[in-house]
Amino acid sequence: MADNENKNSKMVGKQSIQFANPPYIIAAASIAGKKEGEGPLGTMFDTVEEDSLVGKDSWEEAESEFMKKASQKVLQKAGLKSSDIRYLVGGDLLGQLIATSFGVEDLSVPLFGIYGACSTMGEAMSIGAILVDGGYADNVLAITSSHFAGAEKQFRFPLDYGNQRPYAASWTVTGSGAVIISPQKGKKQNESDADIVITGITTGKIVDYGIKDSMNMGAAMAPAAFETIMQNFIDLGIQPDYYDKIITGDLGYVGKNILVDLLKEKGYDISNNHMDCGIEIFDKDTQDTHAGGSGCGCSAITFSSYIINQMKSRTWNKVLFVPTGALLSQVSFNEGNAVPGIAHAVMVEAR
Amino acid sequence: MADNENKNSKMVGKQSIQFANPPYIIAAASIAGKKEGEGPLGTMFDTVEEDSLVGKDSWEEAESEFMKKASQKVLQKAGLKSSDIRYLVGGDLLGQLIATSFGVEDLSVPLFGIYGACSTMGEAMSIGAILVDGGYADNVLAITSSHFAGAEKQFRFPLDYGNQRPYAASWTVTGSGAVIISPQKGKKQNESDADIVITGITTGKIVDYGIKDSMNMGAAMAPAAFETIMQNFIDLGIQPDYYDKIITGDLGYVGKNILVDLLKEKGYDISNNHMDCGIEIFDKDTQDTHAGGSGCGCSAITFSSYIINQMKSRTWNKVLFVPTGALLSQVSFNEGNAVPGIAHAVMVEAR
């Protein structure tokens, strides 16, 4: 195994990888819905679609259209054509990933379809970084989407039903976020921008604390975020202050408190540098989104706008990006199953 | 990019990878349902479950149980514990991959959930081989499942509805197949067995010929199989007779003929060495399965029994294993969308 020695050194601890050739994120794009555009991050998105159906006849087709627009925008920003992309890694929340299938088919790129519920952007960036670091791909497009109306129909009730939402419920983000991962630096939009690289990943396990409330997904996902983040600290031999920001996907207000408390019990204090995309994306006081934003699109469009901007300007140099997913379906919920969680961490650095 | 030169040599042509350190398939396991046990491959499966609910209360829980049993069996055959597995790569046909989530959560292994419809075993083995070849993992467990009753409920109608099935329809296989992919040779069950390695992959694009009949998935998937197989020949610079067998997942009788014809038009004759798992797994004359078997489990349990046995005995030395998927959901079908296909090819060799 002599010639594998160098390679095996990439595995760190139990669940992490450190990349020998940290791949670059050469472009990021965010297409957001109207409500997201009215939120605190509204001015940072590449595009805000005022029509949540984007001219289509169904919520599912609309979500595919968001994804199509995000893929076109990220290619344009990177100055690439779809034929320059070796792999597309992506997924969404709809059954059998139809938002992705119909959203990206015109690109005609080899596809790894993935599903990690709202952690999907973390999984897409993880697999994308592996493909690039290992020399299996030049450019990889990682993409996810979600849609409020499509998700309510998929997981709960169609909007027309007028279902009430408890305060622990989150609001699925309408939008699609995409990044292109590459072995070379891309052309910068501003000369002063930092290069953004993925230095490592910690891949999550399924964590099931037996929570059965599909209207309280923050509580279901917080234990998964806790285990992945703690494992990242252990595997890398670092403390929370290694990162300028530790950013979860969509725990919301309920899940954030649980996460901070769980880590504190283990001696890790992230209260000063933790941020949650689900909390940032909506204004709690004026947008009536209860526990915060959620959905694959939540962490994806927040990363592709606010987070990457803060890193390009070197306001944050080291970020642990941890999209979080609740592994339920309407069927598993109706059959009385618990809602297990999963969280995939991506180590991102400005250089 | 000097230190990437060696790595980039792994990319071959437009869509293929050749592995510098071909990973070993050190174990394979197949858990099959009763009807599959009564078919031509019945005696080759590790376990045949006579009760299609395997003691559970729902079809979904039963499918998870099949997957749990397949993962336990493949670990046992490899002489490994779940803690020896660095990554689990897997998926199924149910919305939001609930068969997988609940089937593998007890293993407590970092998970990449994937979805490629019935091509999922090809995608799982592809990502698994990349992880191992690149030194990102020691052992990877690749697994998929499907269940006849769960799939009918998911995609068409619950069985109790008594829906009629046209002759072009296939019969979803009940079962779960799993392999363990590793950088080292495993311990052999018989000293004379060949080593089985994955030498390369060709990752499929979404191919949409506009077919709208969810009861004729063979026709929907055949064009995807055609494009992936032809691209494999082009990328590798080989002819069909390079392989002892070219084995598609679940085209069935309808799709097989389309595939052979499409390739013939391009000058490739695979009529002598093509085989389809969906055709092999059931007896057409006595089992009333119409166009043949289908589902993630179809190619997975056929690979993990019949195919790997033929390779261990060196009856077949070079196999192109091409699971095929139809990318539809009940929603996309009901909304009048077409059924695009995808096919992922895995180059397997006996050594």
Image: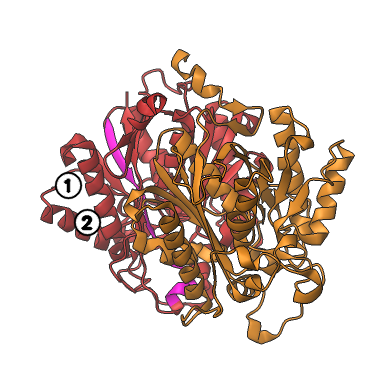
Chain colours: A red, B orange
- Quadrant that contains the C terminus of chain A: top left
For disc 1, the neighbor class at 10 Å (few under 14, some 14 to 19, many from 20) is some
Q: Residue at x 21, y 42 (%)?
A: A233
Q: Secondary structure at mark 1?
A: loop
According to the picture, the residue beneath numbered tag 1 turns out to be A270
Residue A8 locus on image (x, y percent): 36, 32
**In terms of image quadrants, where is residue A16?**
top left
Relative depth, front residue between B11 and B77:
B77
Q: Which residues are magenta?
A: A317-333
State the mark number for residue A259.
Answer: 2
> Hey, what amino acid is under mark 1?
Ile
Residue A122 visible in this rendered orientation of the protein: yes
Q: Residue furthest top?
A: B2
- Alpha carbon distance from label 2 to label 1: 9 Å
> Hey, what amino acid is under mark 2?
Leu
The tag earlier along the polypeptide, 2 or 1, is 2
For disc 2, the neighbor class at 10 Å (few under 14, some 14 to 19, many from 20) is many
B271 is higher (above) or lower (below) than B150: above
- For residue A191, side relative to residue A50 (left or right): left
A161 is higher (above) or lower (below) than A121: below
Residue A20 visible in this rendered orientation of the protein: no
Asked if marks 2 and 1 touch (Cβ < 8 Å), the reply is yes
Residue A61 locus on image (x, y percent): 63, 57
Q: Secondary structure at mark 2?
A: helix
